[in-house]
Image (cartoon, grey):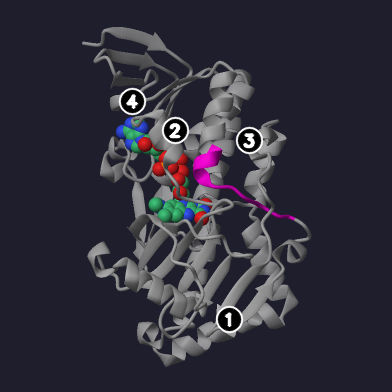
Amino acid sequence: MPSVRESSEVVVIGAGPAGLTLANLLRRAGVQCVVLERQSRSYVQRRQRAGVLDHAGTRIFEEAGLAEVLAGMPGDSTLEIRVDGRPRFLDVPALSDGRTGRIVPQQVLVGRLIATFLEGGGDLRFDAAEVTPHDLDGDEPRVTYRDADGAVHEIACAYVAGCDGHHGVSRASVSADALTTYSYDHGIGWLTVLADVPPPRNPLFAITSHGFAAQFPRGPKASRFYLECAPDDTLDDWSDERIWAQLRLRLGDEDLPAGPITEKAIVEMRSFVVDPMRYGRLLLAGDAAHIVTPMGGKGMNLAIGDADVLARALRATLRDGDGEPLDAYSATCLERVWNYQEYSCWMTEMVHEAGDATLAGTFRRGLARARLDRLFTSEPAARAFADLMAGG
Ligand code: RFL
């Protein structure tokens, strides 16, 4: 039996980029919401993941009057693609007519979105255990949870926003036959390493016969590295010595300093989409509905894009009695989701197959090299690439 009964227009499950963007946009639109987050505030503010907010994502915050959450974040820049040690550069800002994104460490954005929401009087509850949605297919859904003191709350609402990531409770609470899922395993492994190593001048991809590697800036003193590895590799296969040796080899940088490693993880190179992104009064957003590989850096951007579409749709139905945008929510988001999935798969295939011929054979390596060369020899091809990087 719940000990506390409450109500709100919207319950948002999860305080990641999707849930926090949605909550801030709803607050701006005058729609009441409660955000329930399983973890503590300090935990979510320390969780380092994405680092690039594309131009489309940047505009969402600017147009909503939330530009302050991006203050001081540098614009994204030229991209370096180093092929067998030979540097090649793509001037992405010029190729996208200045539609630049920003270098935004995810944990910084999350911290700022939390602060902005709370300063504006928002209702955000951390350490919410056993969050469970109920009656999603009826007109009066509810969400229950247990707070840090053990009290069980029940919140009656009009809509539930499932923004609780790929392993959250929202999608799992819908019967499997109500949703169609699409997933794809790229057949490669990635090791990611966060280290206190000065960031590269430009985001850097390295394509070599030894495998793919990348180095991206993560703030003024840190870099995130990616290393292609065997699909069944575990962390035990990657000692620090092996990591630095392989990074130096693949990046073609013998002088790369071996700074302290602050995080080491195997990244699942799997793509996933659920259709529709809605079940009754439950709307799924962000990683709860889809995951893309980190290649192309679109995961956080999709989460923020969904939140924008959803905030507008909820406002229209709850304030103006116009249910059409909400009915179109899933189809509107999925169009962008599939577009970014294609971009991410295209790039994943290209940068891996252009290097290591053992992956897909010498013929596919030839194709991948041709695709890559086209970015440097054809301005329309380079512009199409930069347009996808900028997002839309
Ligand atoms: P999140 O960030 O996973 O947030 C979900 C939140 O829900 C909470 N939660 C629950 N709360 C209550 N009850 C439950 N039962 C709950 N279950 C979960 C969680 O604690 C969490 O706070 O999902 P969201 O908001 O959809 O955001 C998605 C992004 O985080 C994700 O797409 C990106 O991080 C993906 N990604 C990247 N995206 C980019 O755009 N650019 C990048 O460069 C990039 N690099 C990355 C990445 C993801 C990575 N990993 C670890 C998956 C690099 C890495 C290594």
Q: Does the magenta run of residues contain 106? A: yes
**Which residue is identified by label 3?**
69
Tell me the crowding category of disc 2: few under 14, some 14 to 19, or many 20 or more residues within 10 angstroms, Cα based: many
Task: Name the residue beneath numbered marker 2.
Answer: 15
The structure residue drawn at horizontal position 63% and vertical position 65%, both measured from the top left corner, is 202
Residue at disc 3, secondary structure: helix
**Does label 1 or label 2 sit earlier along the sequence?**
2
Q: Nearer the viewer, mark 4 or mark 1?
A: 4
- Does any portion of residue 323 appear in the rendered image? no
CA neighbours of label 1 inside 10 A, class few (<14), some (14 to 19), many (20+)? some
Nearer-N-terminus badge (4/1)? 4
Number of the front mark, 1 or 2: 2
Kindly identify which residue carries mark 4.
Answer: 127
Q: Are marks 3 and 4 in contact (CB under 8 Å)?
A: no
Judge whether 317 appears above or below 290 on screen: above
Q: Secondary structure at mark 1?
A: helix
Count neighbours of disc 4 (C-alpha within 10 A) and say few if under 14, some if 14 to 19, many if 20 or more.
some
Work out whether mark 2 precedes mark 4 in sequence or the reverse, and give the earlier one.
2
Residue type at mark 4 is Asp
Kindly report the distance in space between the C-alpha atoms of the residues bearing marks 2 and 3.
Answer: 16 Å
